[in-house]
Amino acid sequence: MAADKDKFAAAGVQGALEEPHLELRVPVYWAEAKAALMARDRIMAKLIPQIGDLHLRGQPDPFTTLARSIVGQQVTPKAADAAWAKLLAICPKLSPAQVLKAGAAELAGCGLSKRKTEYILDLADSFKAKRVHADLWSQMDDEAVIAELVQIRGISRWTAEMFLIFNLLRPNVLPLDDPGLIQGISQNYFSGEPVSRSDAREVAANWEPWRTVATWYLWRSLDPLP
């Protein structure tokens, strides 16, 4: 992909949240969603078999998922991976308490900007003080989870949508702020022509209730490695 931001959005976060050393989960709906998408969408009917047996793998720990997303914001996957490795070295358990104990100086030493350091400390404090209701998120609808997450500094709607996809394994998320999704629609449905949010919504209407799955296959069409 052409731009670093696109690389991160289309591949970096997905790869980071599907790291092999983590305990990963496969969505129970994946096979049903694949079959439905291939039956109703001619592009998906070609694309899904090309990707093969790969599938989205979910990361079960909410704090880790959100912290990793913050680390990766607006940097290349390589830079994000380096900072994340250093963070894990000083916080092996990556619990909110461990992150708070490490403090701003040690986090900054991992290569995090001042702002990202503040965001991660605020995230850790929000979890430790139970200002977020992580134990209830699985019972809440998508928009309710997003509304709570965006109250945390450093968590945008896009980050919250990545959380819905990779932690809660929600099947029908359409992250319209994701450059990789837009690029994937452009390349696969519009021969590389520019795509508006309205165009993306129109294409994605045919994917419901499996927009997460279609989005993941479009990411893979741009970068085959999960």
Image (spheres, rainbow, N blue to C red):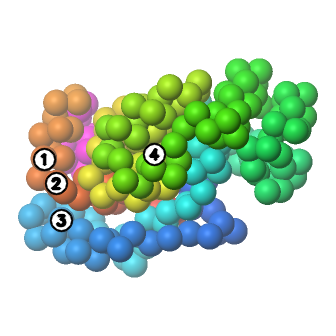
- Check whether the beta carbons of the residues at disc 1 and disc 3 lie within 8 A of each other: no
> Badge 2: how crowded within 10 Å, few (<14), some, or many (20+)?
some
| Badge 2 element | loop
The Cα atoms of the two marked residues, 1 and 2, are separated by 6 Å
Q: Which of marks 3 and 4 is in front?
A: 4
Q: Is residue 210 magenta?
A: no
Residue 2 sits above or below residue 187 on the image? above
Q: In this view, does 134 lie to the left or right of 83?
A: left
- Residue that badge 4 annotates: 162
The Cα atoms of the two marked residues, 3 and 4, are separated by 21 Å
Q: Which residue is drawn at 87% across and 39% down?
A: 101
x and y, in percent, of residue 11 in the image:
51, 50
The magenta-colored residue range is 185-195
Foreground residue, 185 or 22?
A: 22
Residue 1 showing in the rendered view: no
- Residue that badge 3 annotates: 37
The Cα atoms of the two marked residues, 4 and 1, are separated by 19 Å
Q: Residue 205 carries which label?
A: 1
Question: Between disc 4 and disc 2, whose residue precedes?
Answer: 4
